[in-house]
Amino acid sequence: KHVYAWALDHRVHHKYTESDADPHNAKRGFWFSHVGWLFLTPHPDVVVKRKVVDMSDLEADPIVMWQKKYYPLLYFIFTIALPVGIPVYFWNENLWNSFWINYNARYCITLNIAYCVNSVAHMWGQKPYDRNINSVENVAVSVAALGEGWHNFHHVFPWDYKTGEFGTRFNLSTQFIDFFAWLGWAYDLKSATPKMIYNRAKKCGDGSHCWAHNEEKLDKRIFEGAELTDHEKDT
């Protein structure tokens, strides 16, 4: 899917998580949330909510709309032609092998890793920030998906650009954004403060948060506004 379509479903997912209006509602089972939702007819509530979610910011973005307009051509060039053609041209790889490995196998593996965020990260893991929702923290998904598996945090603080409390831990996605922020290309980045995170984890978490083991020491520092050391965050 192009950026616009992914963003649309992601916004609907967050606004109506695990309801009939959620495009990949994990309450309908692992296979539905993993890949079934892409092949089955969407629930009528999904169709309705897709039409009312505000997408005006992306519709005003010329790059997003350009990619949406030319997506079939861009898909062919960057997903099929270049990955398959480069090995054939530069090191005489067999076209058939290149097609099956560099397009089919690669595409299948990367898509299934991405889909694990919708399925695995809504089923198996810890809930340090909110025990009342299905999304979880899953280290395996975070490693495979370059940082997208800290999903309990992401659903509690969806506006935090890091999608995880510790932005650089198994989170190459955050480092990628940070690099472009350093260049000045990414800006207006928002993050939850340690105090906000601590309060939410203490009130709603399942007790698995690392701060739970240092509550007396950290409580005073957080509410006084002091910065936590990396060691304190990790212990």
Image: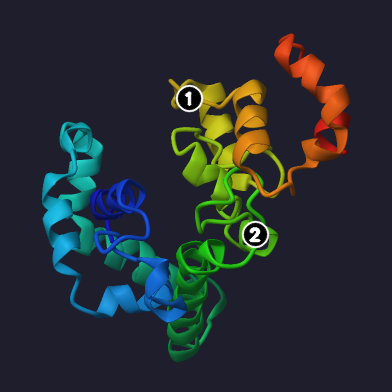
Residue type (three-letter) at the residue carrying disc 2: Asn
**The C terminus, quarter of image:** top right
Q: Secondary structure at mark 2?
A: loop
**Residue 84 on image: x %, y %:** 43, 75
**Residue 106 on image: x %, y %:** 50, 75
**The N terminus, quarter of image:** bottom left
Which mark lies nearer to you, 1 or 2? 2
Q: Which residue is mark 1?
A: 189
Q: In this rendering, would 73 be left or right of 156?
A: left
Q: In this rendering, would 46 be left or right of 201?
A: left
Mark identifier at residue 138:
2
**Residue 76 on image: x %, y %:** 28, 68
Work out whether residue 229 can be spotted: no
**Mark nearer the N terminus (1 vs 2):** 2
Residue type (three-letter) at the residue carrying disc 1: Leu
Above or below: residue 209 compared with residue 6: above
Residue at 78% in and 22% down: 219
